Amino acid sequence: ADAQASNLIAQRAVLQGNVKQAREILSFLTGKDLGNVPFQYSFDRVESVVPVEEALLKASHRFDLQAQKEEVDARKYAVRFAKAGYWPSIFAIGNYYTKRTVDNDIDWDILFNIDVPLFQGGKVRGDVRETYSIYVQERLRLERLEREIASEVKNALTELEASISESKMLDETYLKAKKSYESQARDYRLGLVDNLQVLSAMNTMQTVKQDLDRSILDTKLNWVNLKAAMEDIPAK
């Protein structure tokens, strides 16, 4: 028992160091001093997950994906703009004079300018190929981002479902371990078992309870990861 108590004290010291390090990281990410903010423990269970179709639909509205789609559209219009170099251009400039230094009867004039790119085909062709190459790159980057997001969402769903199933199994295990401990405690009061058997049952129950708490926290973390993959976390 003394050895177990010393081991628990050592584990507590390690966990306190991990908590302090996590607070420093969170303070850096948020720009706020969270070193002394009290913990808000919440063991609310996550019992179900969203359907994969709904999760993928929400993820399709992520800002990074929308930005990449707009980038592809911009590059597509850039190709059209580059192809316009094959066509002649017309400029018109008009002037209206309220007063002129030259004494004549002309109050206005219009200048038409037609530019025909007869000797610029090579340059225009090069510009078109360059802009089209950039357009293809951005389109492939969009397709890759869509696959990455879909994979991220599906993996988050899989981990969440697995952690929920683990929590349910550990629930049953903990109830059985608790009943075993209570039975050993009753038998000890009747002199049927010794204290070592009671301590063994208590250690088993506490170990299962720790695994259950860890599984619940992992489930909540996986739920947050899924929300982040879907970009379904409201900004405050």
Image (cartoon, rainbow, N blue to C red):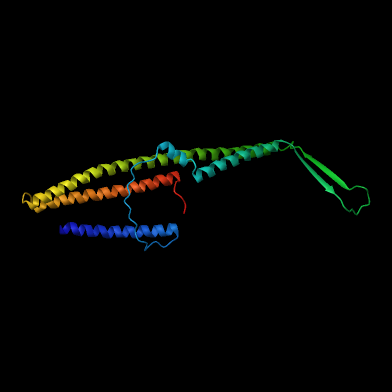
- 4 with respect to 87 (left or right): left
Q: Give the residue drawn at x 50%, y 37%.
A: 143
| Image x and y of residue 177, in percent | 18, 46
Q: Give the residue drawn at x 29%, y 47%.
A: 215
| Image x and y of residue 182, in percent | 15, 49
- 140 with respect to 186 (left or right): right
| Image x and y of residue 173, in percent | 22, 44
Residue 126: in sight, yes or no? no
The answer to which of 139 and 181 lies nearer the viewer is: 181
The answer to which of 34 and 21 lies nearer the viewer is: 34
* Labels in figure, total: 0
| Image x and y of residue 107, in percent | 89, 48
Q: Residue furthest left?
A: 191
- 90 with respect to 53 (left or right): right
Q: Quadrant of the N terminus?
A: bottom left
Q: Is residue 203 above or below residue 127?
A: below
Residue 143: in sight, yes or no? yes
Q: Quadrant of residue 129?
A: top right
Q: Give the residue drawn at x 14%, y 50%.
A: 200
- 220 with respect to 12 (left or right): right
Q: Is residue 137 above or below residue 2?
A: above
